[in-house]
C-alpha cells in the first residue's frame, strides 16, 4: 500500500493543476446540485419492529387521513393575574385565533377549540388550541409555519400571554458562531504547529472543500434519500475534524521529508506513502464505526451514519490527492520564513530534537512515563474511572420542548402548559385499540385502574367501528421515569390488540431499541477494528490495549455528559437550561464516532513506535522515538478536534449541543489521558511482548506495509535518478 500511495502522491504533485481542477469541479458540481435540488419534503422517523410504530401503521390503515403521525402544534393562552380565559373579551381573542388557523393552511387536519374540547385549566387561567397536520414537521411548507406563527403573534397584545409550541415549529438547527470560533482556533493551532500561514492554511482549505462537497451532496440528495435535518450537521462536524487532522499529518510528514534534504516531489510521494497509509487505516476505522450504526435498524440513524462516512471518505481522498497537489503549488512557502532562509532543518519539522540534541516536549514526557509507568497508569485509569462514575446513573430519552432555551416560544408554551394543566399535558399518550367499542371501553377501564395518569379520554371509534383511539395524559413530564413506567403499565395491563404510541411512547421505544443494539454494535465495531489494527500493527496486545483504552475514555465521557446535562453540574456554563435524560442515541453514537476518532491517534502515534521497533530499537527507545516524531502533531490534531466539536456546543438545538460536548470531552480524555499516558505506560510495562504475534497468524496476515519498509526497498531499488511509474489520477 505504501508504494501505491507513494506513486499516487508523486503523480498528484506532478499533475497538480489537473488534480486541483478536478476537486474544484466536484465542489462546483455538488454546489450546483444542492442549489437546484428540490427542498427536502420528508424526514420520516420510523422505528421498525416497535409497538409505537405498529400503532402508527394501524392508525394509518384504520383512520385514513387523520394524520396520526403528522405534526402537531399548540397555541397556549394565559390570562393576566386575577382574570380568566373564559372572560368574554379573552374568549373572543381565542376564537379569532381558531378561525385564523382553520383558514391558514390546507395542510391542517383539525383545530380544536379549547372551549368545546375542555382544554381550559381548572382555575380558568390557561387554555390551549391543539392543531393537527396531515404531514410530519419536515413536510410542512413555509407558508404553513408562517400562518401558525402569525396566528400566535396576532393574538399577542390583546390582553393575553400567547406562546406557540409543538413539533410543527421544528426546523433546521440554527448555526451559531461557535463553529466559526472552532475553525479559528484550529487555524491558530496550525500556525503555532507549523510556523507558516501557508502550511496552516492547507489543512483548513482542504477540510472546507471536503466538507463543502459532502454537505452539498447531502443537501442535493436529501429529498431523494429522505435525510433528516441533523444529517448534514453531523457530516459537517465529523468531516471538518477528520479533514483537518488527516491533512495535518501529511503536511507535517512532508515538511519532515524536506528537512532530510529530499526534493519536493519525492517528499510529497514519501509523505503520502507513509503518513497516507496511516490516514487510510484511520479513515477505515471511522467509516466502520459510522456505517456500523446500521445494525441498530433505525433508518434515520443509518442514513446519518452513511452520510457522515461518505464525508470521511472524501476527507481521506482529498488528503491523498489534493494535499500533494497543493503542496506543489505552495513551493517553499510551506516552510516558515526562518526555514526558507536556511535555518536548522530540525526546527522546521514536527518538533524533533535539534542538532544539539535538546529533547522536545514529547521526548521528555515519554521518558517520564517509561521511568514511572505504574504511577502514570494508575493515575490515568483512576482519574477516568472517577469521572465515569455518573455514567452509572444514566437515564435515556429524547429531548422535548422543555429542554429548549427559555428564550424560545416553544419552551415558554411548555412551561405555561405545565403550570396550567400539569407537565403530562406536554406529552399525551395515544392508545390504539384494534377492536370494537366494547374492547375499547374495557381498555379505558383497565387504564383507569393504573397509577400515574392525569386524564383518560373516552374512546373515539373509527367509521368502521373496528378500531378506536384513547388519549391518556400522564401526571409527570414526557421525559420522566414515571411516564415511562405508565407506558409499560398500560402495555402490561392490556392485551395484544391494544397498542401505545405518540411521541412520548415512540421516544421510549427508541431508547429501548438503542439499549438493545449497544452490545451487538460494540461487538461489530470493536471486533472489525481489532482485526484491522492487528493487520496494521501485527500484534495482539496493542489492538487489545487500544480497544480497552477506548472503552475507558468513552465511559468517562458519558459520565461527564450525565454530570452536565442530567445532573446540571456546570450546566449554565454550557448553556443547559433544563436538565433531563440523556439523548437515547448518545451512548451508541459516541461509541461509533469516538471509537473511529480514537483509533486515529492510536494509528498515528503507535505506527511510528512500531516503525522504530522493527528497525531495531528497543521497546523503550521505540516509545520515545514515536513520541519525538508524533506527539506534537497528535496534540495539535486533538486540540483541533476538541475546538471543532466544542464549536457545536453553542448551537441552540439540545441534541447537537450534547453531541458536541460529548465528542469534545471524549477526544480530550482519549487523546491526552489514554493515548498520551496510558498507552505508553502499558507498552513500557509489556516491553517486547507488546509486539508479539503468533507465527501462524503472521504468515496468514497480508503485509500492508504501513511503516513503509516495502516503500524504502522500492525507492532504493529504483535508484534516485529513475522516476518510478506514476499512477494516473
Image: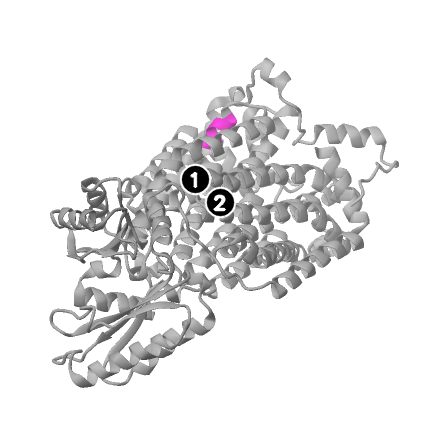
The residue that label 2 is drawn on is 302
Residue drawn at 33 percent across, 37 percent down: 385
In the visual, does 47 lie left or right of 718?
A: left
Residue 362 x/y as whole percent:
54, 40
The residue at 36%/44% (across/down) is: 558
Q: Earlier in the sequence, mark 1 or mark 2?
A: 1
Q: Is residue 412 magenta?
A: no
Mark 1: which secondary structure?
helix
Tag 1: Cα neighbours inside 10 Å, few (<14), some, or many (≥20)?
A: some
Residue 544 inside the magenta-drawn segment: yes
What's drawn in magenta, residue-wise?
A: 542-547
Query: How far across and down, in percent of the image, does residue 165 sit?
Result: 32, 67
Q: Which mark identifies residue 296?
A: 1
> Which corner quadrant holds the C terminus?
top right
Which secondary structure is most common in the magenta stretch? helix
Find residue 643 and report its horizontal and vertical position in percent. Answer: 49, 55
Q: Which residue sits furthest right?
A: 721
Q: How is the image coloured?
A: one colour
Q: Nearer the viewer, residue 516 or 430?
A: 430
Closest to the observer, 680 or 646: 646
**Residue drawn 36% across the image and 41% down it:** 513
Quarter of the figure with residue 83 = bottom left
Front-lying residue, 32 or 642: 32
- Residue 190 position (above or below residue 263): below
Amino acid at each position: 500500500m505504501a508504494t501505491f500511495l507513494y506513486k499516487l502522491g508523486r503523480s498528484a504533485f506532478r499533475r497538480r493543476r489537473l488534480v486541483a481542477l478536478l476537486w474544484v469541479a466536484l465542489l462546483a458540481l455538488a454546489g450546483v446540485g444542492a442549489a437546484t435540488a428540490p427542498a427536502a419534503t420528508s424526514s420520516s422517523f420510523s422505528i421498525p419492529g416497535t409497538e409505537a410504530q405498529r400503532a402508527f401503521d394501524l392508525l394509518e390503515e384504520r383512520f385514513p387521513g387523520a394524520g396520526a403521525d403528522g405534526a402537531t402544534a399548540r397555541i397556549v393562552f394565559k390570562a393576566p393575574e386575577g382574570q380568566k380565559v373564559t372572560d368574554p373579551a379573552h374568549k373572543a381573542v381565542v376564537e379569532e385565533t381558531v378561525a385564523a388557523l382553520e383558514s391558514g393552511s390546507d395542510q391542517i387536519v383539525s383545530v380544536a377549540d379549547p372551549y368545546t374540547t375542555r382544554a381550559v385549566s381548572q382555575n380558568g387561567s390557561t387554555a390551549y388550541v391543539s392543531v393537527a397536520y396531515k404531514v410530519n414537521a419536515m413536510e410542512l411548507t413555509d407558508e404553513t409555519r408562517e400562518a401558525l406563527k402569525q396566528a400566535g403573534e396576532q393574538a399577542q397584545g390583546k390582553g393575553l400571554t400567547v406562546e406557540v409550541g409543538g413539533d410543527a415549529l421544528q426546523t433546521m438547527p440554527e448555526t451559531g458562531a461557535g463553529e466559526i470560533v472552532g475553525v479559528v482556533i484550529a487555524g491558530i493551532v496550525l500556525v503555532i504547529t507549523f510556523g507558516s500561514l501557508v502550511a496552516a492554511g492547507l489543512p483548513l482549505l482542504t477540510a472546507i472543500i471536503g466538507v463543502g462537497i459532502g454537505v452539498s451532496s447531502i443537501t442535493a440528495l436529501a429529498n431523494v434519500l429522505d435525510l433528516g435535518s441533523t444529517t448534514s450537521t453531523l457530516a459537517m462536524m465529523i468531516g471538518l475534524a477528520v479533514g483537518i487532522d488527516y491533512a495535518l499529518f501529511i503536511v507535517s510528514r512532508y515538511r519532515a521529508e524536506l528537512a532530510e534534504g529530499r526534493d519536493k516531489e519525492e517528499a510529497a510521494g514519501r509523505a503520502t506513502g507513509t503518513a497516507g497509509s496511516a490516514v487510510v487505516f484511520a479513515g477505515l476505522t471511522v467509516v466502520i464505526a459510522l456505517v456500523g450504526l446500521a445494525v441498530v435498524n433505525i433508518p434515520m440513524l443509518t442514513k446519518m451514519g452513511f452520510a457522515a462516512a461518505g464525508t470521511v471518505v472524501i476527507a481521506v481522498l482529498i488528503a491523498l490527492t489534493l494535499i500533494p497537489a497543493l503542496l506543489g503549488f505552495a513551493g517553499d512557502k510551506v516552510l516558515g520564513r526562518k526555514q526558507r532562509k536556511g535555518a536548522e532543518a530540525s526546527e522546521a519539522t514536527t518538533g524533533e530534537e535539534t542538532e544539539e540534541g535538546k529533547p522536545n516536549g514529547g521526548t521528555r514526557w515519554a521518558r517520564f512515563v517509561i521511568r514511572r509507568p505504574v504511577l502514570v497508569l494508575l493515575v490515568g485509569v483512576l482519574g477516568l474511572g472517577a469521572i465515569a462514575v455518573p455514567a452509572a446513573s444514566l437515564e435515556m430519552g429524547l429531548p422535548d420542548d422543555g429542554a429548549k432555551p427559555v428564550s424560545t416560544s416553544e419552551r415558554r408554551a411548555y412551561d405555561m402548559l405545565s403550570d396550567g394543566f400539569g407537565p403530562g399535558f406536554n406529552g399525551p399518550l395515544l392508545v390504539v385499540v384494534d377492536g370494537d367499542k366494547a374492547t375499547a371501553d374495557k381498555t379505558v377501564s383497565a387504564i383507569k385502574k393504573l397509577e400515574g395518569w392525569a386524564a383518560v379520554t373516552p374512546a373515539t371509534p373509527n367509521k368502521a367501528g373496528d378500531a378506536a383511539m384513547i388519549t391518556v395524559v400522564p401526571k409527570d413530564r414526557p421525559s420522566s421515569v414515571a411516564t415511562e413506567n405508565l407506558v409499560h403499565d398500560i402495555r402490561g395491563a392490556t392485551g395484544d390488540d391494544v397498542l401505545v404510541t405518540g411521541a412520548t411512547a415512540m421516544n421510549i421505544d427508541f431508547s429501548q431499541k438503542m439499549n438493545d443494539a449497544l452490545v451487538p454494535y460494540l461487538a461489530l465495531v470493536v471486533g472489525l477494528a481489532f482485526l484491522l489494527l492487528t493487520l496494521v500493527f501485527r500484534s495482539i496486545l496493542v489492538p487489545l490495549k487500544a480497544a480497552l483504552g477506548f472503552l475507558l475514555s468513552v465511559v468517562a465521557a458519558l459520565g461527564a455528559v450525565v454530570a452536565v446535562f442530567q445532573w446540571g453540574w456546570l450546566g449554565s456554563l454550557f448553556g443547559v437550561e433544563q436538565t433531563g435524560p440523556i439523548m437515547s442515541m448518545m451512548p451508541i453514537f459516541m461509541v461509533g464516532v469516538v471509537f473511529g476518532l480514537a483509533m486515529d491517534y492510536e494509528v498515528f502515534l503507535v505506527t511510528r513506535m512500531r516503525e522504530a521497533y522493527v528497525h531495531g530499537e528497543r521497546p523503550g527507545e521505540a516509545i520515545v522515538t514515536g513520541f519525538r516524531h508524533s506527539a506534537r502533531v497528535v496534540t495539535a490534531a486533538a486540540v483541533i478536534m476538541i475546538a471543532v466539536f466544542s464549536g457545536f456546543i453553542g448551537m441552540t438545538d439540545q441534541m447537537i449541543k450534547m453531541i458536541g460536548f460529548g465528542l469534545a470531552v471524549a477526544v480530550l480524555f482519549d487523546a491526552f489521558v489514554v493515548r498520551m499516558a496510558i498507552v505508553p505506560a502499558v507498552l513500557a510495562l509489556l516491553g517486547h511482548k507488546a509486539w508479539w504475534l503468533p507465527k501462524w497468524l503472521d504468515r496468514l496476515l497480508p503485509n500492508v506495509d504501513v511503516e513503509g519498509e516495502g516503500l524504502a526497498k522500492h525507492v532504493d531499488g529504483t535508484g534516485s535518478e529513475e522516476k518510478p511509474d506514476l499512477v494516473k489520477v
